[in-house]
Image: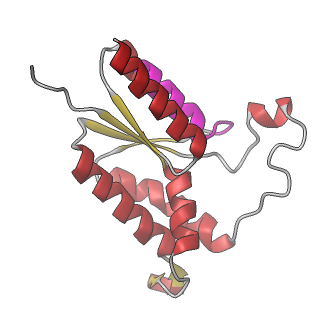
Amino acid sequence: MTQRRPLLIIDGDSFAHRSYHALPKTIRRRGDKGAGAILGFANFLLRLYETEKPRAVLVGWDSLDEPTYRHDALEGYQSGRTFDDELVDQLDVLPEFVAACGFANAKEGGYEADDFLAAAVGKEEKRGGTAVVASVLAREWQLNRLAERLDALA
């Protein structure tokens, strides 16, 4: 039996944040703008693609410009959360990089990457496929582990 290639679903913001904080701020690009998040994210993305050999890639992004339904439902949700201007600049560039690689982006006002990840997993499983979720956040690892256990039971 031939194993189908999975849909690779990536939490773009989590990898971008990790890269930004892990790499030196001395990594620069044209115009003396920061590039650490871009470099680190690119390395993660390409390594994941090479390792997983997916049929397609979807990268989900948080919307920073407007509140999500979580802000309405949960008082104080992400209150006090701030981002360095250099990180925000790189978060604006990263979807362009993803698209240049031929991969899909999911970003829409009022939504977070989690929303797109969960929707994509559900849609992929409904079509009988396999989804691999990549995130540095614990809740996505839990989602991925649950999907693996459900696959094992099927």
In this rendering, is residue 76 above or below 148? below
Check the image and name the residue furthest to the right.
75
Indicate the colouring scheme: secondary structure
In this rendering, is residue 110 above or below 38? above
Quarter of the rendering occupied by the N terminus:
top left
Please state the horizontal and vertical placement of residue 129, each as a whole percent of the image. Answer: 30, 21
Please state the horizontal and vertical placement of residue 26, each as a whole percent of the image. Answer: 52, 88
Kindly identify the residue that appears in the image at 49 percent across and 75 percent down. Answer: 36
Kindly identify the residue that appears in the image at 52 percent across and 60 percent down. Answer: 16
Q: Please check the rendered image and state whether residue 42 is part of the magenta-colored stretch, yes or no.
A: no
Residue 131 as seen in the image, left or right of residue 115: left
Quarter of the rendering occupied by the C terminus:
top left
Check the image and name the residue furthest to the left.
1
Q: Quadrant of residue 96?
A: bottom left
Please state the horizontal and vertical placement of residue 44, each as a whole percent of the image. Answer: 38, 59
Q: Quadrant of residue 140?
A: top right
Q: Quadrant of residue 103?
A: top left
In this rendering, is residue 34 above or below 2? below
Residue 46 as seen in the image, left or right of residue 32: left
Between 34 and 142, the one lying in front of the other is 142
Kindly identify the residue that appears in the image at 35 percent across and 64 percent down. Answer: 43
Q: How many marks?
A: 0
Between 104 and 140, the one lying in front of the other is 140
Q: Please check the rendered image and state whether residue 114 is part of the magenta-colored stretch, yes or no.
A: yes
Tell me the magenta residue range.
Answer: 109-123
